[in-house]
Amino acid sequence: MEFHKRSFIFIVSVTLLLSSLNFLPTSPYLIAETDRLVLLAFRENINDPSGALSSWNESSHCSNWTGIICGRRHPTRVVGLDLLSMSLEGSISPHIGNLSFLKHFVLYDNHFTGGIPEEISHLSRLLQANNSLTVKIPRNLSSCKSLTDLVLTRNDLVGGIHVELGSLSMLQLLQLGGELLRRNHPNFTFKPFVSHSNSSRIQQFTSITANNFSGTIPPQLFNISSITIFYVTSNKLHGSIPPYIGTTFPRLEQFGIGGNRFSGVLPCTISNLSKLSDLDVVDNQFTGPVPKLGTLHGLITTNFERNYFGEVFSVTLNNLTGQLPASIANLSTKLTQLYMGGNNIFGEIPPAIENLVSLNGLGIEDNQLTGSIPVSIGKLPKLISLTIWGNQFSGKIPSNICNSSQLEQIVLSGNRLQGGVPSNFGNCLKLRYLDLSQNQLTGTIPKQLIGLSSLSNLLNLSWNHLTGDLPSGIGNLVKIVNLDLSNNKISGNIPSSLKNCFGLRYLSLDGNSFEGAIPPSLKSLMGIEYLGLSGNNLSGQIPEYFQSLVSLVYLDLSSNDLEGEVPKLGVFKNISAFSVDGNDKLCGGIPILRLPSCPRPGSKKQSKQFQLNRLILIIFGVRSSAPSNM
């Protein structure tokens, strides 16, 4: 009891002294002594179990005390109070408001309780974090006209956000929840926020942090054009985000509203925030489409998880950079379409992707993803479209990839996939479009695949290392429009069964080892527009029926062993519509080809008869001129 009495007398004495300062002549010593007495009064409210503030005593100048920073221009005045991580307990003394030069007030990682004193409004910058405060935001914070950074996070602040805060015209940073972001992100991440212990902003503002705010955000706050950082994460705020946010926040760099109850549609004007680097809207109730972010070239961190963005989540062509997190598999189980193509995302597809049981469209093409294609993709029962081309996937194509009987489109091109083409593709009874080109696949073409009559749009196996003959079952692809088997090592004869592929418009067998004559059955392909047979070992003559294929736009027969006359009609009338280069035994054709003339029909037979007749005449002539022995 005696201790509390002495403490009360001391605080009253300091208060009387401070209240009388207006009537005393000012001197540097007196002002310095004033700040020292204020700090001692502040110390009286603190329990210091670790002795971190043992240097705070009456025998030394406060500039030598732990956590005290004096000014450069005003070396006798306290400008900084940094009590970071000192295990302090107690309450915040109202006398703190009398440190009139105080700009930096750091109480992060301590155990303060109680309220925020009204006198705090005298401070121009405020940083207080990781405490146990259970109070409302003081309304008179609006009196801090010089306040540039207001951070109230990781506390138990309750109540609403006051309209008066909208009058803080100098405010640049508003954080009412969550963790501070590092200013320099080495990598993109979908994770909400990272620790702020290395933040370069730590010397410029402080935080009061993880609260219990409720209600809506006053619209006045969205009109403070000077704001660069806006965080209200991990609260109970609700309402919608105004559509004009992209206009009123021209300097906004970081925007975090995750962990609340916001609803409605995310404004499309977010795409106008050209300086935005960090965007977090995780754990809300937003609906509708995700705004187009492709123009935000500085965007580093995004988090859209656990919302209700309809059944489609698309951030395609949004310039996102960084690692694909495993948490992507935690999106809503009602999600039907997930598109993230055309970014710079790296990492691996998490095996837990199978959790997205409603997914019918998965597109993460044109990124920098690595690793193998997880077998769990084969466990997505409703998957219709899988497009993961243009990455760096390696390993084998999962043998269960067609366990989803709904698959209609598979695009795995432009990766580093190895092994054979799975025969399991024969189970994709609805497959219309299959592109496995530009990989390192080996082995033969499975009969189960080319027996898949549903293939109609495309079968592309080009630029691999496939070998063996082209099975005659290729004729089962009666609906196929585009067939590309070029640049492999396929050998044998071109199967005549191709005549059954009536729908073909594009057929490329270039760059293989086909041999023998061009089959006459190809004349049935009346709708063919491109026919590529170059770079093989084909022999014999050029079929004349090519002249009758009226839809044929380009014919490539170059680099073979063809012979005989080049036709002159149909596609052969225009030099830009065909190529026969690299066939040394050809003749004739249109003049621009400059090939040797072909022998006239029957000219060889007539020449032989002429020589025979001449020989007979010579023989008879010799006999008639010989002398008679009669």
Image (cartoon, rainbow, N blue to C red):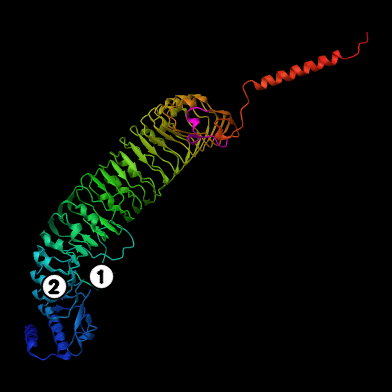
* Residue 565 forms part of the magenta stretch: no
> Could you tell me residue 335's position as x and y percent?
24, 45
Task: Report the residue marked by disc 1.
Answer: 201
- Residue 68 visible from this viewpoint: yes
- Residue 399 as seen in the image, left or right of residue 594: left
> Could you tell me which quadrant the N terminus lies in?
bottom left
> Could you tell me residue 108's position as x and y percent?
20, 72
N-term mark: 1 or 2: 2
Residue 630 vs 262, above or below: the answer is: above
Residue at 65% of width from left, 22% of height from top?
Answer: 603
Q: Quadrant of residue 595?
A: top right
Kind of residue at disc 2: Lys
Residue at 32% of width from left, 45% of height from top?
Answer: 363
Return the residue nearer the eye: 43 or 170: 170
Kind of residue at disc 1: Arg
Task: Report the residue marked by disc 2.
Answer: 145
* Residue 577 forms part of the magenta stretch: yes
Residue 64 vs 172, above or below: the answer is: below
Give the structural element (helix, strand or loop) at label 1.
Answer: loop
Give the structural element (helix, strand or loop) at label 2.
Answer: loop
- Residue 115 visible from this viewpoint: no
- Between the residue at mark 1 and the residue at mark 2, the CA separation in whole angstroms equals 20 Å
Region rendered in magenta: 568-582
Label 1 Cα neighbours within 10 Å, binned few <14 / some 14-19 / many ≥20: some
> Could you tell me residue 241's position as x and y percent?
16, 55
Return the residue nearer the eye: 123 or 468: 123
> Could you tell me residue 206's position as x and y percent?
20, 71
Residue lying furthest right in this view? 629
> Could you tell me which quadrant the C terminus lies in?
top right
